[in-house]
Image: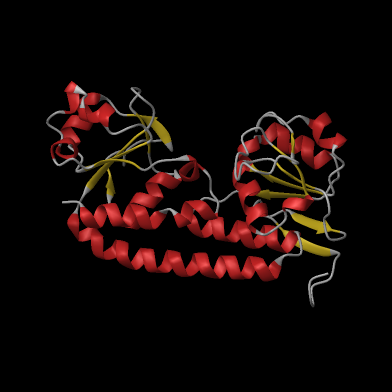
Amino acid sequence: SAKGHPFPRQITDQLQRKVVIPQKPQRIISTVPSNTEILLSLGLAKYLVGATNWCSYPSQNTQIKKIGELTPLNMEKIISLQPDLIIASVLNGRESLEKLIKLHIPLIIVNPQSFDGIIDSISLISLATGRQEIGGLLTNKLHKKLFALKKQGQNLHQKDLKIYIHLGHDSNWTAGPGSFLDEAITLAGGFNIAYDLTKPWGKLTNEVIIARNPDIILTDTPPGNLYHNPLYQNIAAVKKKQVYQLITDQFYRPGPALIDSLPKLVEIIKESH
């Protein structure tokens, strides 16, 4: 048991639910990739009995049973694995969460809305699993990193560099306010040209992209796709060769790797003009 913090313990999760965890969990199920990443970074691989099909991180944990999709969750599969703790997320959807609550198995629901929220969710999960010590080390490290990045980013804001996040091969999908990608850009000292999207994810028209003339394009596809796109030939980012394939899985996953990948973004903004 954790020194000075024996079980049972009561925890308030990120939906402000009070949850009692009777003993140190031995059979944990994670219902989203970010929670899986957090559990593994806390050294809990051997207690993790189930995770979703999308929990690809890290790939070598093949003994973890697949429980299926993020939503709707497969309740039969979850019950069959006999968990003594389920770590879920708002991303699983209200209906699945209501079903999980009815199982009367200790259930922690996370809902990180910001980088600080990610760090809070790590603290919460470490508390629920009796791993405060390693959790404290990890959250301290991430807090320090975030603080240093915020300071650097504040200095870079003077550059006024406009950034376009280009997702998917030819769809103009992008990330707006409410997404971690948008928060990452602001934190790193850039300006997201999709600032007026009403949802975290949406599309910009080619006309808007061309008119807003981004200095930097961050994409999840090879930069050549954009360099060769006839529509984009007059965009500053293309002319200055400032298109970067930076966006990978970790930018969609509110876990430690997302915060670890932010320095790359700060570096790009620093080097760009």
Compared to residue 204, the image places residue 18 above or below, namely below
Within the image, what quadrant is residue 234 found in? top left
Residue at 22 percent across and 55 percent down: it is 271
Image mark count: 0
Question: Looking at the image, can residue 165 be seen?
Answer: yes
Question: Looking at the image, can residue 189 be seen?
Answer: no
Within the image, what quadrant is residue 208 found in? top left
Compared to residue 206, the image places residue 25 above or below, namely below
Q: Position of residue 152 (x, y in %)?
A: 31, 65
Relative to 232, is 105 on the left or the right?
A: right
Residue at 21 percent across and 42 percent down: it is 242
Q: Position of residue 137 (x, y in %)?
A: 60, 70
Relative to 10, is 31 on the left or the right?
A: left
Compared to residue 141, the image places residue 251 above or below, namely above
Closer to the camera, 8 or 252?
252
Compared to residue 235, the image places residue 110 above or below, namely below
Q: Position of residue 136 (x, y in %)?
A: 62, 70
Q: Quadrant of the N terminus?
A: bottom right
Closer to the camera, 93 or 249?
249
Residue at 33 percent across and 32 percent down: it is 222
Closer to the camera, 71 or 198?
71
Q: Position of residue 74 (x, y in %)?
A: 76, 29
How has the structure been colored for display?
Answer: secondary structure
